[in-house]
Image (spheres, grey):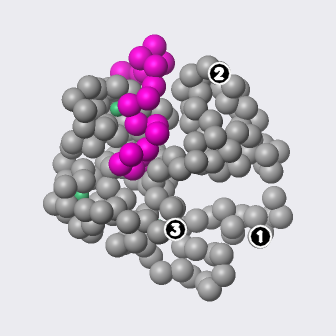
């Protein structure tokens, strides 16, 4: 979960555990296995990573990677990728939090040494993974802003707030 639930009346969750919230602690993730107030979750944008639904990817170094209790781990992620995968390259496969199991040693189609699952620009070589605005999309492939103010392309948060006042 990326964002702030305190301003959203619909965002009342009953946590089954194993969730991650960043940056705050407003989503009622109150199980011992939940991880809250993570300053930088390193989540990617909601995108098509394969499988029947869109998923939020996990970027290299995300606190969600390899941090889930084995008891809470399902056999596959929402895409159908088998769990667990070794996401931090330490040779030990542990489940990730959320609907996405990052395979950081998987295919690397742009050849920059960062696997597609964990690359913030999977089609643009950017070994350093620079992301100066921290939105999970690397500087190397960040689309230019549509407007000069806060309305950044791909980030509907500001748009929704402006439209609904929520
Ligand atoms: Ca993992
Ligand atoms: Ca890559
Ligand atoms: Ca890349
Ligand atoms: Ca960015």
The residue that disc 1 covers is 162
Q: Residue 37's mark?
A: none
Report the magenta residues as a range.
57-77
Q: Residue 31's mark?
A: 2
Say if 72 sits above or below 64 in the image: above
Q: Nearer the viewer, mark 1 or mark 2?
A: 2
Q: Position of residue 124 (x, y in %)?
A: 27, 68
Please say whether residue 69 is visible from this viewpoint: yes
| Secondary structure of residue under mark 1 | helix
Residue 38 appears in which quarter of the rendering? top right
Identified at 79% across, 46% down, the residue is 6
Identified at 48% across, 81% down, the residue is 144
The residue that disc 3 covers is 133
Q: Residue furthest top?
A: 71
Please give left or right for residue 118 compared with residue 154 in the image: left
Say if 159 sits above or below 52 in the image: below
Q: Is mark 3 within 8 Å of ligand 4?
A: yes
Q: Nearer the viewer, residue 80 or 97?
A: 97
Spatial separation of the CA atoms under disc 1 and disc 2: 33 Å
Check residue 46 for magenta coloring. Answer: no
Q: Position of residue 74 (x, y in %)?
A: 42, 21
Question: How many residues crowd around disc 3 within 10 Å: few (fewer than 14), some, or many (20 or more)?
Answer: few
Q: Are marks 1 and 2 in contact (CB under 8 Å)?
A: no
Q: Position of residue 61 (x, y in %)?
A: 39, 46
Q: Nearer the viewer, residue 107 or 129?
A: 129
Q: Earlier in the sequence, mark 2 or mark 3?
A: 2
Check residue 63 for magenta coloring. Answer: yes
């Amino acid at each position: 979960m990326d964002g702030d639930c305190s301003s959203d009346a619909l965002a009342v969750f009953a946590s089954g555990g194993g969730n991650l919230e960043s940056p705050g602690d407003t989503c009622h993730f109150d199980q011992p296995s939940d991880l809250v107030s993570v300053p930088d979750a390193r989540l990617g944008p909601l995108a098509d990573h394969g499988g029947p639904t869109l998923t939020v990817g996990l970027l290299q170094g995300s606190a969600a990677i390899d941090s889930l209790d084995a008891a809470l781990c399902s056999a596959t992620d929402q895409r159908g990728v088998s769990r667990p995968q070794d996401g931090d390259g330490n040779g030990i496969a542990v489940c990730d939090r959320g609907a996405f199991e990052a395979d950081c040693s998987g295919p690397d189609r742009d050849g920059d040494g960062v696997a597609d699952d964990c690359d913030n620009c999977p089609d643009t070589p950017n070994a350093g993974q620079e992301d100066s605005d921290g939105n999970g999309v690397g500087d190397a492939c960040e689309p230019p802003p549509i407007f000069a103010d806060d309305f950044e392309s791909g980030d509907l948060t500001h748009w929704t707030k402006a439209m609904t006042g929520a």
